[in-house]
Amino acid sequence: MSSFKDLRIVDNFYQTSAFFPMPTVCISTVNDDGSLNIGSYSLCFPYYIAGKGQYAMLLECRNTSNTCHNLLNRGKCAINFIPDDRRYFREAVRLGFPGPSDEKMKTNLFTMEKGLAGPKDQDRPQVIAEAFQVFECTWNRELENAGK
């Protein structure tokens, strides 16, 4: 008899059935009206790490999410790695639910500030001051046919 249990795979398998470490990141983007959007994600991984002359991250997100819409339209985001703190994880869960950005951002717990990459660029989102690390990213539409 095995010591393992057979788990039923469900739609959010990576949260309930797959046990491997994933960071919780808050992706900040700029909405069409210029306001801030923050979405929480765990499926964010290094893609190019060596030998390509550039670095790249891979983000898995719904194509109907505010984050996806904003990335497609403006091509910029900040990947905010939040500290291991119960308050911040509660906020990440709250911000991770689908819905209008303006409603979610009314009670944003995080302190926002301008990042270091293009602080005058209106398409560049603010970063989370409490984050222990932030990657300010630009979407490369040509990278392996990402624009398709």
Image (cartoon, rainbow, N blue to C red):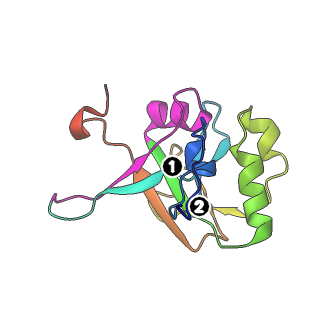
Q: Quadrant of the N terminus?
A: bottom right
Mark 1 packing: few (<14 Cα in 10 Å), some, or many (20+)? many
Question: Which residue type carries mark 2?
Answer: Lys
| Amino acid marked by disc 1 | Arg
Instruction: Decide if residue 27 is in sight here.
Output: yes
59 versus 52 height, above or below:
above
For residue 63: magenta?
A: yes
Mark 2: secondary structure: loop
Is residue 110 in view? no
Provide residue 144's location: percent of width, then percent of height: 22, 38
User: Helix, strand, or loop for circle 1?
Assistant: loop
* Residue 134 lies in the magenta stretch: no
The residue to which callout 2 is attached is 114
Task: Decide: is 10 above or below 113.
Answer: above
Picture residue at 80% right of the left edge, 60% below the top = 109
Q: Name the residue at 61% across, 69% down.
A: 131
Q: Is residue 24 above or below residue 11?
A: below
Q: Position of residue 63 (x, y in %)?
A: 51, 28
- Along the viewing direction, whichever of 67 and 1 lies nearer the viewer: 1
Q: What residue is shown at x 58% (from left), y 74% (from top)?
A: 132
Q: Which residue is mark 1?
A: 124
Magenta residues span 52-75
